Image (spheres, rainbow, N blue to C red):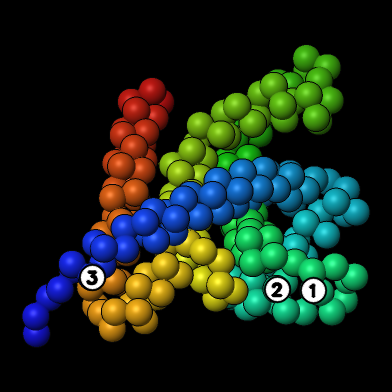
Amino acid sequence: MRWDFASVFTNTDALLVGAIGTLHIFVICLVLGLSLGLVVGLGRYARTPWFRWPATAFVEFFRNTPVLVQILWFYFALPMLLPFEISPLAAASLGISLNSAAFSAEIYRGGIQSIEPGQWDGARALGMSWGQAMRRIILPQALKRMTPALTNRAIEIFKMSTLASAVAYVELLQQGKLIASLNYNPIEAYTTVAVIFFVFLWPMVQFTYLLERRLRRSE
């Protein structure tokens, strides 16, 4: 076999558009997934069943159904139930964000539960309410322990952005498919896409390792 990357490099503008699309959906899903995950995680830890049960149902549903199915459902089925169309970006962002929120919620819940009960007792002795104790004492300590897991979650969100190609959202994999179909060079096109993902993700992974080492030293 003869490798021919020239046909891929002649379409660098398409790859650039795809990279911008990937970064766009990554930022959206990262912010929505981690933010909503915190809300759901707090709901999972709440004492009131009216908060705990819906949060538990949310986690179990989105954690136990495939992200790709969720994206396709939002894109094809949701417009049949609601009187508006949904764009590929919105469908992919909903699927990836809600799925990530379900997994992030368990990270938050586990981090909160790892805090010693004495911290809660001390907060109550100072006259703090549940919310005040959570905001001032429990969450700052828990976030320190959760940081490595949350950064790993961010890496997973970046890789899941490729699933947006299923609804024709313009991201790296979608552009790789386009180049492969135009030039009949799938190996070269997908190899280039993989290399671009590695270039984006390798610094993030190294940052995760660095963060873990610093957090261990500070304990």
Pick whichever, 209 or 3, lies toward us.
3
Check if mark 2's residue and mark 1's residue have beta carbons within 8 Å: yes
Disc nearest the viewer among 3 and 1: 3
How many other residues sit within 10 Å of disc 3, few (<14), some (14-19) or many (≥20)?
Answer: some
**Element type where label 2 sits in the image:** helix
The residue pinned by badge 2 equals: 75
Estimate the x, y position of residue 207 in percent, counting from the top left: 34, 37
**Element type where label 1 sits in the image:** helix
The three-letter code of the residue at mark 3 reads: Ser
Q: Residue at x 23, y 70 (%)?
A: 7
Q: Residue at x 65, y 29 (%)?
A: 138
The three-letter code of the residue at mark 1 reads: Leu
Pick whichever, 122 or 85, lies toward us.
85
**Is 108 placed left or right of 165 in the picture?**
right
Q: CA distance from mark 2 to mark 1?
A: 6 Å
Q: Can residue 204 be seen in this snapshot?
A: yes
Q: Residue furthest left?
A: 2
The residue pinned by badge 3 equals: 7
The residue pinned by badge 1 equals: 78
Q: How many numbered discs, if any?
A: 3
Q: Is residue 67 above or below residue 17?
A: below
The quarter of the picture where the C terminus appears is top left
